[in-house]
Image (cartoon, coloured by chain):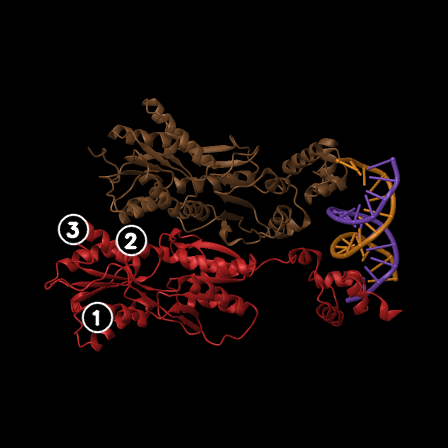
Chain colours: A red, B brown, C orange, D purple
Amino acid sequence: MASNERPAKLTLAAIAREAGVSAPTVSKVVNGREDVAADTRAKVLTALERTGYKSPLQRKNTVWRRPVVEVVIDTLNSAYGVEVLNGVLEHAAASDVEVLLNVTGQQRGSHLSPEQRAQRMVDEGRSGMIVVTSAFSAAELEPFHRRQIPIVVIDPLNPPQGEVVSVGASNWAGGKAATAHLLGLGHRRIAFLGGPEAAECNQARLHGYMAALMADGVAVEESYIFSGPFRPDNGVAGMKSILQLEPRPTAIFAASDSIALGILAEARRQKIRIPEDMSVVGFDGTYQAEESVPPLTSVSQPLQEMGRAALRFVMRQLRGDTLDSHRVELATHLVVRESTAPPAG
Amino acid sequence: MASNERPAKLTLAAIAREAGVSAPTVSKVVNGREDVAADTRAKVLTALERTGYKSPLQRKNTVWRRPVVEVVIDTLNSAYGVEVLNGVLEHAAASDVEVLLNVTGQQRGSHLSPEQRAQRMVDEGRSGMIVVTSAFSAAELEPFHRRQIPIVVIDPLNPPQGEVVSVGASNWAGGKAATAHLLGLGHRRIAFLGGPEAAECNQARLHGYMAALMADGVAVEESYIFSGPFRPDNGVAGMKSILQLEPRPTAIFAASDSIALGILAEARRQKIRIPEDMSVVGFDGTYQAEESVPPLTSVSQPLQEMGRAALRFVMRQLRGDTLDSHRVELATHLVVRESTAPPAG
DNA sequence: CTGAAAGCGCTTACAG
DNA sequence: CTGAAAGCGCTTACAG
């Protein structure tokens, strides 16, 4: 008879039987009351753990909730961010994960300390976080690590910190390829219109640029190197400066498509023809590079794949898998369109 | 004695007394069961709302969680959707609401019935939903209404359904203004390159176009009217057709900026100069209209404001406020840039 | 579609 | 400190 009994439902009463105590006693233990003898409490706790008992509340909360991953991003007003987000969303749909969006340009929740934000993530049942092109200190991440909340960073704006898991692209190789392409067309005076000076990805692109120049025996000219935000206005301002240089560069390698778009706009205003008077290479390879006038030669990053990889990393950490590496770097490749040509003359 | 009684505890039974029904009936309503007569349900809902009843589960969950609102959108690959989303995010940041993003182009959760999706929203503690440019039937929305989940629709792709709360813009006036602008420049052969034929907003724009023509005594030419998706490829295909019309139109009113961008691209390929050979007006007024070549004359919609208004509507319903109206329509206005000029000759 | 009755699982109050 | 008994609040099963 005993061997054919179906397993009793997991109720307080069942735990009580299991532990050899009464239901009210189990109730007290579950509710953290103090009027229970230590050894009685121990017996009950053992039974609770062995059977995996959940209160009706907990059970209702476990109706199979999908994991919720928060994506933190500074702005959606660039094709870069939207593409990364699309990758995250695609993988989220495939793996039944929900995506919470937090655009920090809008300063949400900035009044909270990292400690409070991490605690709130636990309270609200959030599973992990993906941070896109942001700067953060080890101290800001520590409260999340302590609570075992997986965080993955895409293209951090500051140098990698200890244990941080990050996803990026081969920026150095991309910068080298872009510059080599211009050199191959015959350009010798090539400007670098960069992103934020401190950004890892920007430094790698700059060093790729310098490596290509050096490989061809072209001296690096300090006055040809600029930096600023990854935004069109930086391209506009940079283009104005570059047009006043003597001797004037014949080509520009821009560290992002958004910067390159600013260059194109300023060129139009000043009646500088692209590529006849000036060649321009961008970086990112978003759809904006395809649709610009003229279509932009650009170093394409697998942005969607980067988003997917970031979410995959979060989920792996959630499952408790060990990671092979704390950094994934996906390949970039140069796409030649119509904004580059041999220099005039 | 009655006047000094302390208020009865807020139990199912109390609600039942209040509504003049039995406890099991209240239980059914609270749990979203279907076997309750509409008027009985209404009585119970009133009582629930008046007393602010919370189930034990809800009571325990009220550790002060921020409301979570889900935004459902077909794609982020258009400036339209991103702008609306920016508006939602901005108001969400200001009012301490979390935003969950669901991009349906990726078919997520499509295997679930509306009933299941609505129940899951309750289970996962979601507060409300904002649906952007989607089609849906009354039957699809009913399970959400039954569970008192506020839904607000932005620019529905099908005609408004009964109780649906929606946000939009003055499409008819905008279509009329765009067409009047072209007529004022001297155009008489004006094509309409529209969006989805069934879409409310598209129909309003089309009728605004016809109203302007008729006001100027210009006959509506059926062969000048096209429809298709709100996407650049529709603009490309439409432009090809229009260029073959005899006599050829001298201007095009496109029902969205994305369609207009396709027109500009095809014009470039065919060496048709804009605006010298053909004037083009778009609709939406996204940043793409500013950055295109040439910059696009377009009817600007307050997309961010529409996103903000949608979230405000959701929150009002959550608080149980009565809505003044089930439809908000914000003003559009024409922004003249460089894609329109008097016809040649 | 409704509700009286039975039931379920947890908690409370209190005697020992 | 423990547990039999009573109680609470919600849900289920089903007769009408």
Picture coordinates of residue B156, whole percent (x, y): 49, 39
Q: Amino acid at mark 1?
A: Gly
Q: Quadrant of residue A200?
A: bottom left
Q: Amino acid at mark 3?
A: Lys
**Quick one: label 2, few (<14), some, or many (20+) residues within 10 Å?**
many
**Quick one: label 3, few (<14), some, or many (20+) residues within 10 Å?**
few
Residue beneath label 1, please? A184
Labels 1 and 2 positioned on one and the same chain: yes
Front residue of this view, candidates B204 and A91? B204
Judge from the rendering whether residue A341 lies leftward or rightward of residue B37; answer left or right: left
Q: Indicate whether A53 appears above or below B36.
A: below
Front residue of this view, candidates B300 and A179? A179
Instruction: Indicate which disc, 1 or 3, sits on the residue closer to the N terminus.
Output: 1
Q: Which mark is residue A271?
A: 3
The residues bearing labels 1 and 2 have C-alpha atoms spaced at a distance of: 24 Å
Q: Quadrant of residue A226?
A: bottom left
Q: Indicate whether A129 appears above or below B314.
A: below
Residue beneath label 2, please? A292
Q: Which mark is residue B27?
A: none
Picture coordinates of residue A185, whole percent (x, y): 20, 68
